[in-house]
Image (cartoon, grey):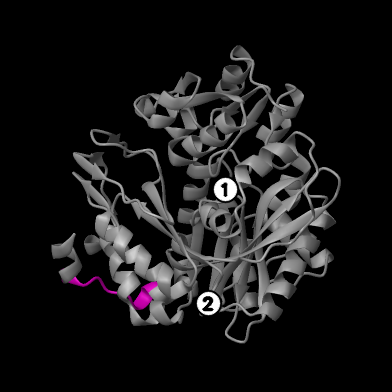
Amino acid sequence: MFKKILIANRGEIALRVIRTCKEMGIQTVAVYSTADAQSLHVRFADEAVCIGPASSHDSYLNIPNIISAAEITNADAIHPGYGFLSENAKFSKICEEHDIKFIGASAEMIDKMGDKASARKTMMAAGVPCIPGSKGLLKDYDECLKTAKEMGFPVLLKATAGGGGKGMRAVYEEAELLHAWESARTEAKAAFDNDGMYMEKLIEDGRHIEIQIVGDSYGKACHLSERDCSIQRRHQKLCEETPSPFMTDELREKMGAAAVKAAESIKYEGAGTVEFLVDKDRNFYFMEMNTRIQVEHPITEQVIEYDLVREQIKVAAGIPISGKNYTPVMHAIECRINAEDPFHGFRPSPGKITNLHVPGGHGVRVDTHIYAGYEIPPFYDSMVAKLIVTARTREETITKMKRALDEFVIEGIQTTIPFHRQLMDDPRYIKGEYTIKFMESFKMDEKYKDEF
């Protein structure tokens, strides 16, 4: 087992990894930018190293500085969290070259699956149904235009190294394509240092359902059931739940088998997520595979009593998995609390938190790195907390989430708490009748502004 792990990330996910490491008796090293000097992950790690200024490019994407931090602290492994370098094949390879274990996929696996264009080819070869799209990366705008015309609008441009909705653009007509191409590439380059793009046919009214998988270094993989991530805005997930209210036992078995087949076809090692788009007739199509831990992983942990970060670390240390597939025995919902103003187009709301009260009680979990007096920097993702509630049934879980949201107080900034509270009252959500287009018709009610 590892003696010391460096967490190459920030915020709540860095703190999340530190907690499991401490429970396993493993020393931790936090890295941070100058903007994150007061973050809790810096405080609670055993050691901390500043790796650069506020810009992600100069800090959390700065591979030489991160490797140097690992070497000077004698860390024998690096956990990348999600985002930043978590699906960067070059980083994984450099870790290997420096005899530092990358707790995640190998460079070869990331090239096959973390790179979304390559993943399509791999899945098609494995017989997993895929959304019609480009055969590989689009080399330039001319090929982008030609592919779109051949495929027919609407289309979806996607960054091959993307995540969190960054580098994705839905395009409904030719006049929009050039601007979408340029803006998506610019956004992907800034976020992932990779502006490679590919294209898919846009399926407009489906469900976004993902299967959590874990594979070990012996070629064995299993799935941990599904998460429904269809409540999203501009391809950025807002609220997730498991099990999906759209799922059937037959569909879960088929999708789970496809996800395990995908993982075992490349001898995948570590935790990962196979993401599917499911149409109204419950036909499912592979979209992409995330070769990392997901933001929404806690809801899976809550319904099957399974520490995914612990399992990541064990697999990286060469410990085999059981191979058992899991089915949820409870219901869980996660609300992403972002520093955004839902009454004004979800515009960012960085600033100082003047007062904070976090909800508690049975079946309530809050993953966060904020505290009263904490200054939320404007340089990174706007998520400040994840509120996860668990109960025996979906109805009970929604009721509990309402109560927990009512208790959640964050003052000094605007947050998405009012949005989530209204969502829990929405008749369509309560019935489980929602798709990825849900937010297109959702309007904030001013009464929730007064209550929160």
Vertical position of residue 111 compared to residue 392: above or below: above
Which residue carries the number 2 mark?
245
> Toward which corner of the image does residue 328 lie, by quadrant?
bottom right
The quarter in which the N terminus is drawn is: top right
> Toward which corner of the image does residue 303 lie, by quadrant?
bottom right
Q: Report the residue that reaches farthest toward the top.
A: 72
Q: Report the residue that reaches farthest toward the right.
A: 218
> Toward which corner of the image does residue 24 lie, by quadrant?
top right
Q: Position of residue 370 (x, y in %)?
A: 33, 38
Q: Does residue 441 show up magenta in the picture?
A: yes
Circle 2: residue type: Pro
Residue at 66% across, 76% down = 284
Residue at 67% across, 52% down = 272
Along the line of sight, the residue nearer the viewer: 395 or 181: 395
Give the residues drawn in magenta, as a range.
439-446
Which residue carries the number 1 mark?
195
Q: Position of residue 411 (x, y in %)?
A: 19, 46
Along the line of sight, the residue nearer the viewer: 304 or 10: 304
Is residue 138 visible in the rendered image? The answer is no
Q: Is residue 44 left or right of residue 68?
A: left
Q: Is residue 269 left or right of residue 35?
A: right
Circle 1: residue type: Asp
